[in-house]
Image (tube, coloured by chain):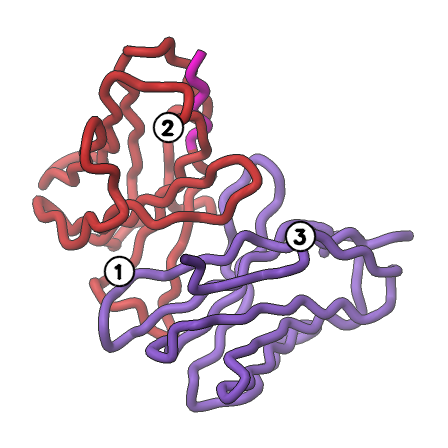
Amino acid sequence: NAGVMQNPRHLVRRRGQEARLRCSPMKGHSHVYWYRQLPEEGLKFMVYLQKENIIDESGMPKERFSAEFPKEGPSILRIQQVVRGDSAAYFCASSPSGLISYNSPLHFGNGTRLTVT
Amino acid sequence: DQQVKQNSPSLSVQEGRISILNCDYTNSMFDYFLWYKKYPAEGPTFLISISSIKDKNEDGRFTVFLNKSAKHLSLHIVPSQPGDSAVYFCAASALNRDDKIIFGKGTRLHILP
């Protein structure tokens, strides 16, 4: 886990505010995945990004959620106008290439725990 | 609709005995299966994987068995140690179709002293 850095570790927002979650992938990794874990649930895929490209956002809610991975800097998951149901742990993972292979499974960060009050 | 199912939310095993965690899947396109281990307040850590061309993969105390006809896999930990107490996630991917890894809901393993 040490390689993928997520911040903040904990984030508290009031309903209606914006939440920004950051993820710096492991060194040499150019592909980032975001997953969400709701209480008592498994990890749900949200979005997969390459530098400056969204490859697959099929798991992303259609409204209020967006993600980016700019050429420079970390990947950002943004949640606008947060609601209580957004409270969850958000995990970022990275891989060196776009193909998960037998020798390069996803490496996860320690997550950001978002609490919406 | 859950494609990867872990039907036991929790499991308690005596230290030194074998822990067996089970997982079922529904998507026949899955060809790569993984197990991740997660401690509280940490991210999931990759444990072991198996490709669909194999039926067994072993790494130290951890062995994963795959039964493709039954769409079932299991993780065996032997002997179980206190540090094995964690949540274990089964996951699967269809490597030739897309790059998503689909996770189950997890099984919380308790190793009893």
Q: Which mark is residue A7?
A: 2
**What amino acid is labelled 1 in the image?**
Pro
The numbered mark at residue A96 is: 1
What colour is chain A?
red
What's the residue at 42%, 68% (across, down)?
A: B92
On whether residue B10 falls in the magenta region, the answer is no
Q: Are marks 1 and 2 in contact (CB under 8 Å)?
A: no
The answer for which chain carries disc 3 is: B
Q: Is residue A114 magenta?
A: yes
Residue at 81% from the left image edge and 54% from the top image edge: B111
- The residue pinned by badge 3 equals B9
Q: Residue furthest right?
A: B113
- At label 2, counting other C-alpha atoms closer than 10 Å, the crowd grade (few under 14, some 14-19, many 20 or more) is some
Q: Colour of chain B?
A: purple
For discs 1 and 3, the disc positioned in front in the rendered view:
3
User: In the image, B102: left or right of B110?
Assistant: left
